[in-house]
Amino acid sequence: MPPIRIRIPRMLLVVLGLMLFVSCVNPYETCACSPPPDEAVVYGRVTDPSGAVVAGALVRAERGPPGCQPSVERWEGTTSATGRYRVSVYSHGGPDADWCQRVFALPPAGSTLRGSDSVAFTVRYRPAGSQPDSVRVDLVLRAP
């Protein structure tokens, strides 16, 4: 009995070879682009000194070298009608892993309230695309 020969079209072989190559390659090395930064989330609620929620407050999260002065990276968000906020923060890892991280709130335009105290926070940054770690920080604006 003669051996069985299976003919596979060349185009199919090319496609299969390309798929194998792509599956084994780090896409960031191939395109010479930086990988996306690691992500974390800071969330919470902003209130006034009496405990009432504050809508429209600006919440700012910052990162900088130890000592927190000056900040190098800054992310912002605004509180909703219920006083809640959510700010995504990012890190490129490396030697800045022990940098100072803080968050504070500024009152909405036209308010007589003053900004909140800065609150230091610690959070674990996770690769983009995975479930980010988060930390809740509630902030209180100061009386005029």
Image (cartoon, rainbow, N blue to C red):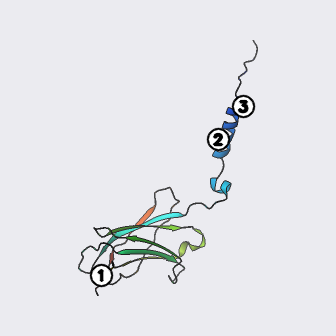
Q: Which residue is mark 2?
A: 19
Q: In this view of the protein, which residue sits in the foreground, 8 or 41?
A: 8
Say what secondary structure mark 1 lies in: loop
Separation of marks 3 and 1 at Cα, in angstroms:
71 Å
* Nearer-N-terminus badge (1/2): 2
Residue 109 image point, x, y percent: 33, 79
- Tell me which residue sits at (72%, 31%) in the image: 10
- Seen at 37% across and 70% down, the residue is 78
Q: Residue at x 55, y 63 (%)?
A: 37
Residue depicted at x 37% and y 82% = 117
- State which mark lies toward you, 1 or 2: 1
Which residue has dot 3 on it? Answer: 10
Mark 3 residue element: helix
> Gap in Å between the C-alphas at discs 1 and 2?
59 Å
Relative side of 135 to 125, left or right = left
Which badge, 2 or 3, comes first in the chain's sequence? 3
Q: Is residue 32 above or below residue 23?
A: below
Q: Which residue is mark 1?
A: 111
Amino acid type at circle 3 is Arg
* Foreground: disc 2 or disc 3: 3
